[in-house]
Amino acid sequence: MGVRHERVLRGSPARPLGQLVREYLLTLCVTAAVTYLLSGPVRKFAIAWGAMTAIRARDVHREPTPRLGGIAMFGGLCAGLLVASQLTNVGQVFRLSDEPRALLSGAALIWLVGVLDDRYGVDALVKLGLQMVAAGVMVLQGLTVLWLPVPGVGMVALTPMQSTLLTVAIVVITINAVNFVDGLDGLAAGMVCVAASAFFLYAYRIWYGYGIESAAPATLFAAVLIGMCLGFLPHNVHPARIFMGDSGSMLLGLVLAAGAVSVTGQVDPDAMRLFTGSERSAVTEMVPVYMPLLLPLTIIVLPFLDLVLAIVRRTWNGRSPFAADRGHLHHRLLEIGHSQSRAVLIMYFWSALVAFGAVGYSVGANAWVVPLVVVLSGVGLVALLLPRFTPRVPGWAERVVPPRYRSRRRAGRVRPAEPAARAWAEEP
């Protein structure tokens, strides 16, 4: 009775945990199913409409591939939100908040811009301006940052102008970070799925664990985003049958940014009552807790790092920051010697390490999170640099390892009937 009374004082929602999980799982599955089922017809439509990705010097695919995968994703987003609005518990989000409608309005606009860009091409500056307009549409409907926890200061309320500028900046940066990383089959969808999964765990903990209803929209956005990615990935893994295009990458970035804006700027840390001191000391101590949510760049740090490096590299070379090249992180992984599939898995690994490591650190599990992150970072570095060296294996094991790991003396003794194996063994 004492535990239940404490939860009620904190404002915990009087809803069974199992029922909430089932509703979120249903929303996720419906979103994934609709996205998956629409991807096939959308592929045929893209081919008939001529929305094909031509082979450019910076591309890694070897044949023209249809775009417009964002159409299927947007269909999944609409279906997921529609189903969620009819559910008993999750549907309360639509009755208590305008944020789902704000998300849908901004997503529709950015999706339309992406479709036009995939088919006809849109100037980079025009596209940037329209991204700001989409973010502004969400701000006008209430999806905005209201305050920020600042260490040593406390809760800082933002003026309407500051709130608008900060929200637009977060949305635009996240959209372009996801767009920049979309260079290999399944890379952007998988990385966003990893980030959204970590985001869902944290937002759900704030909502259900502490009873803060203002975190409910972000939890719903994360569940829908996971479904969009999971439904599209089977069609997009190497070799991809359809690309998401800008209509998909910008849509994923906007949904991810909307969730981060919702939970960062509208959840009051003092409402969680984790500390009994002053507001200033509480906010200062809670900065590690809010690190994954202060900016969405914390959970998509790799796309953001790629974005920053690309801008610096292109500007340093006297080119436009929007001029495409082959200097992205995934291109460098291919140059090292990784295959497409292995490069994508490595990017997945580092994204999961950063996202879930930040979430684990934020909940106060520092005693085991930091050593685990250090150990896994070492494993990731070994996997990253694996093509740079060829380990020597004992003579007794050379019969069971691929030819490239055998010594040159033994690898040369290949029967004439195995030309493929001989060529593999002679590769540097």
Image: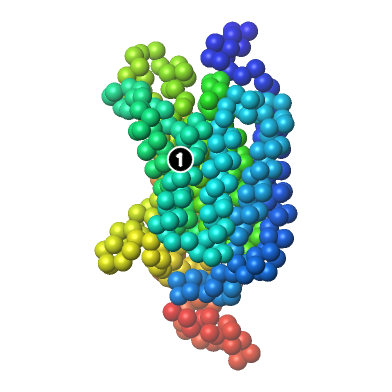
Q: Residue 417 placed where, x, y %?
A: 64, 90
Give the residue drawn at x 56%, y 51%: 111
What amino acid type is highlighted by mark number 1? Gly
Nearer to me, 9 or 364: 9
Residue 384 is left or right of residue 201, and the answer is left
Nearer to me, 311 or 338: 311
Numbered disc 1: secondary structure: helix
Q: Residue 301 placed where, x, y %?
A: 41, 48
Colouring method of the image: rainbow
Residue 38 is left or right of residue 348, and the answer is right
Nearer to me, 285 or 381: 285
Give the residue drawn at x 72%, y 31%: 86
Check the image and report above or below for 42 versus 144: below
Looking at the image, the residue that sits furthest to the bottom is 416
Q: Residue 113 placed where, x, y %?
A: 53, 54
Give the residue drawn at x 61%, y 39%: 223
Give the residue drawn at x 35%, y 54%: 308
**Quarter holding residue 21:** top right
Check the image and report above or below for 34 versus 155: below
- Badge 1: how crowded within 10 Å, few (<14), some, or many (20+)? many
Check the image and report above or below for 395 versus 141: below
Q: Which residue is mark 1?
A: 136
Residue 239 makes an appearance in the image: no
Assign the C terminus to one quadrant of the image: bottom left
Residue 273 makes an appearance in the image: yes
**Quarter holding residue 295:** top left
Assign the N terminus to one quadrant of the image: top right
